[in-house]
Image (tube, helix red, strand yellow):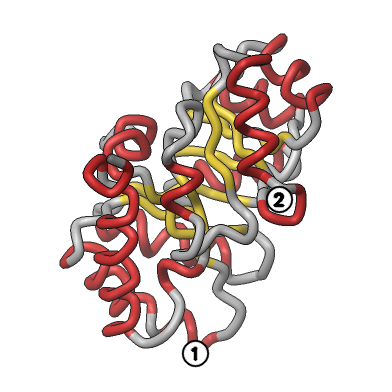
Amino acid sequence: MQNPLELLTSYRLLPILTVRTHEELQHLEHLITTLKEEDLPIIEVTLRTPFGLQTLTRIHASGLCVGAGTVRNAGHAREALESGAAFLVSPAYREDVALFAREHSLLYLPGVLTPLEVERALDRGFTILKFFPAEPFQGVKVLAHYAEVFPEAQFIPTGGIDETNVSIYCSLPNVIACGGSWLIKGGFEAVSRNIRNAKTLVSPQARD
């Protein structure tokens, strides 16, 4: 199995997919093919809709590294694991999800925003954190402060990240990757362009 943390650190991008309709589900194979062709082998599927678990199952079967997002309790976590999830993401820290992830040796990315939430997650041994929602709360400025206050913490900001700001976020020393749905929006040619452009924007050369 591919190590999700290694993939996040290497590719620095995390597409976030929410399937809302049967039609979107039918187009899933095209998205999988595009991700493989563009060499972006990791994706998060949210559990916000009834299509989440079957989407997880199909992407897992394709060989891509897939994680479950919007995991809000241990029941969600168990269903996600049974559907092939390699990592779990929550909008906020959940003790029951954290315990489940530890029990099953799964990467868990709890959502944080405030200093208190960061401190709580760190106190429980979680140093890789989802920063959410980033843009509505001036994420670049906040994370720059957190780099000094919480030097042991690393973040994956999501929420309002797109091609206009991803390079700024990825230039921060405590950001290992950025997540967003913009990477996989539009037709499949658009998705290919989005991924290629994003890879250029987060490359070391783009930040020099």
Mark 1 is on which residue type?
Glu
Question: Residue 18 vs residue 66: left or right?
Answer: right
Q: Is residue 82 visible?
A: no
What SS does tag 1 mark? helix
Q: Is residue 124 visible?
A: yes
Which residue matches tag 2? Answer: 133
Q: Is 26 rendered above or below residue 70?
A: below
Residue 65: x and y in percent read: 33, 47
Say which quarter of the image contains residue 184: bottom left
Point out which mark residue 199 bears. none
Q: Residue at x 51, y 57 (%)?
A: 165
Residue 123: x and y in percent read: 71, 9
Q: Judge depth for marks 1 and 2 and give the one in front.
A: 2
60 vs 43, nearest the viewer: 43
Query: Furthest-left residue in view?
Result: 37
Work out whether mark 1 precedes mark 2 in sequence or the reverse, and give the earlier one: 1
- Pointer 1 local density, CA inside 10 Å: few below 14, some 14–19, many at least 20: few
Q: Is 206 rendered above or below residue 125?
A: below
What SS does tag 2 mark? loop
166 vs 73, nearest the viewer: 166
Say which quarter of the image contains residue 131: top right
Placement of the N terminus among the 4 image quadrants: top left
- Pointer 2 local density, CA inside 10 Å: few below 14, some 14–19, many at least 20: some
Residue 207: x and y in percent read: 32, 43
Residue 63: x and y in percent read: 25, 53
Q: Residue at x 55, y 39 (%)?
A: 88
Say which quarter of the image contains residue 57: bottom left
Question: Residue 66 vs residue 153: left or right?
Answer: left
Q: Residue at x 67, y 49 (%)?
A: 134
Placement of the C terminus among the 4 image quadrants: top left
Mark 2 is on which residue type?
Pro
Which residue matches tag 1? Answer: 23
